[in-house]
Image (tube, rainbow, N blue to C red):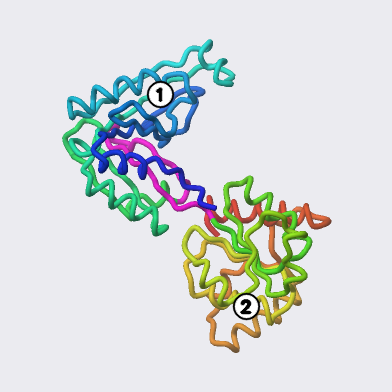
């Protein structure tokens, strides 16, 4: 499953098909705005839409402005106040205000730049789209320089009040090695939290459709499987088998990859043996220190479901606050 929306991709396709396209992006919000900063709506020159900037309450006005912007070939920066009455209609407790940047593809947002953005997204490379809201500094893509925004998945306007940064992070991914009871609780919880989970266990009796309905299950040997899935900065790895023959091969791959989280089930004594094996295999102290073991926050968890909660909580802390 791919948790990316397809809004930039849709806009690029409409533009290349000769139908015209514009991207509308929420750049600032105040109060209980319907969508978070960075939310996007694609509008074709024929009035087709994909995505949302307001949950429906100002979409019509944005589409009308986008169609005019496509025709004129100029960007527009729009401000909408969401009344309490309108907010109630889309399920909000109170009103808010949003600013929306409308950019026609080609005349304002260069086709080549949008294509480059789409390529970054397809290849799971984090990228930021940077635009000068006053129209003087142009537009560019950046892969560094916005560490906090990348870490927090937080698009927004910089302190200068004019530079807008839209963060395009790859979807979060969780790789679980070991089709055990904890995994049965962890995978659906992770999906709710925004992860695309993948379960790895060569033992088909454990990793069966009956025990894990609807999940992506790989029955390959763990080191080959994690390599095939991919280990990048938006991936977490959790090892649950208690069996070094299964856990260690995947663990050794992950320790040499930029995954943001590595967690391993087991007692303090079990982890000490793990550390000894890794040290003998040539891994250094700093590499081994990346492992969170025993896995999960110490919340006194009892039973598989509570352990899964502790694991997901620790993953979230590391993702948002660092190790």
Residue 171 magenta: yes
Q: Residues within 10 Å of mark 1 (few under 14, many from 20)?
A: many
Relative side of 6 to 199, left or right: left
Q: Which residue is label 1 attached to?
A: 98
Among the 4 quarters of the image, the one containing residue 107: top left
Q: Position of residue 48 (x, y in %)?
A: 37, 29
Q: Position of residue 162 (x, y in %)?
A: 27, 33
Relative side of 151 to 127, left or right: right
Along the line of sight, the residue nearer the viewer: 48 or 118: 48
Q: Position of residue 50 (x, y in %)?
A: 41, 34
* Magenta stretch, residue numbers: 151-172
Q: Which residue is label 2 attached to?
A: 221
Q: Is residue 281 above or below residue 144?
A: below
Q: Residues within 10 Å of mark 2 (few under 14, many from 20)?
A: some
- Which residue in the rendered view is the most extreme toward the right? 302
At 25% from the left edge and 32% from the top edge, which residue is drawn? 133
- Which residue in the rendered view is the most extreme toward the top? 85
Along the line of sight, the residue nearer the viewer: 222 or 263: 222
At 62% from the left edge and 75% from the top edge, which residue is drawn? 220
Q: Is residue 304 above or below residue 50?
A: below
Residue 26 magenta: no
Among the 4 quarters of the image, the one containing residue 43: top left
Q: Position of residue 88 (x, y in %)?
A: 57, 15
Q: Earlier in the sequence, mark 1 or mark 2?
A: 1
Among the 4 quarters of the image, the one containing residue 304: bottom right
At 24% from the left edge and 46% from the top edge, which residue is drawn? 140
Q: Quadrant of the C terminus?
A: bottom right
Whether residues under marks 1 and 2 lie with C-beta atoms below 8 angstroms apart, the answer is no
Q: CA distance from mark 1 to mark 2?
A: 50 Å
């Amino acid at each position: 499953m791919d948790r990316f929306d397809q809004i930039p991709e849709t806009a690029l396709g409409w533009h290349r098909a000769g139908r015209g396209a514009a991207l509308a992006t929420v750049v600032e919000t105040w109060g209980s705005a319907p969508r978070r900063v960075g939310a996007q709506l694609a509008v074709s020159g024929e009035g087709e839409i994909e995505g949302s900037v307001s949950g429906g309450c100002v979409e019509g006005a944005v589409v009308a402005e986008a169609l005019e912007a496509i025709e004129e070939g100029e960007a527009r920066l729009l401000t909408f106040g969401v009344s309490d009455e309108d907010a109630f209609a889309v399920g909000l407790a109170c009103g808010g205000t949003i600013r929306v940047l409308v950019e026609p593809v080609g005349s304002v947002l260069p086709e080549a730049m949008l294509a480059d953005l789409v390529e970054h997204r397809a290849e799971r490379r984090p990228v930021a789209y940077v635009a000068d809201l006053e129209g003087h500094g142009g537009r560019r893509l950046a892969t560094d320089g916005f560490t906090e925004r990348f870490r927090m998945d937080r698009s927004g306007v910089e302190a200068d009040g004019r530079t807008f940064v839209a963060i395009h992070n790859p979807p979060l991914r969780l790789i679980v090695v070991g089709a055990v009871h904890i995994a049965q609780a962890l995978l659906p919880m992770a999906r709710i939290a925004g992860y695309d989970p993948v379960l790895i266990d060569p033992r088909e009796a454990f990793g069966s459709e009956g025990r894990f309905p609807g999940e992506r299950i790989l029955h390959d040997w763990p080191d080959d499987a994690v390599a095939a899935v991919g280990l990048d900065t938006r991936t977490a790895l959790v090892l649950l088998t208690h069996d070094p023959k299964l856990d260690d091969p995947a663990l050794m791959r992950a320790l040499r990859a930029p995954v943001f989280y590595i967690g391993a089930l087991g007692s303090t004594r079990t982890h000490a043996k793990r550390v000894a094996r890794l040290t003998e295999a040539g891994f250094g102290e700093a590499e081994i220190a990346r492992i969170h073991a025993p896995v999960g926050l110490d919340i006194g968890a009892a039973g598989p479901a509570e352990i899964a909660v502790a694991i997901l909580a620790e993953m979230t802390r590391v993702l948002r606050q660092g190790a």
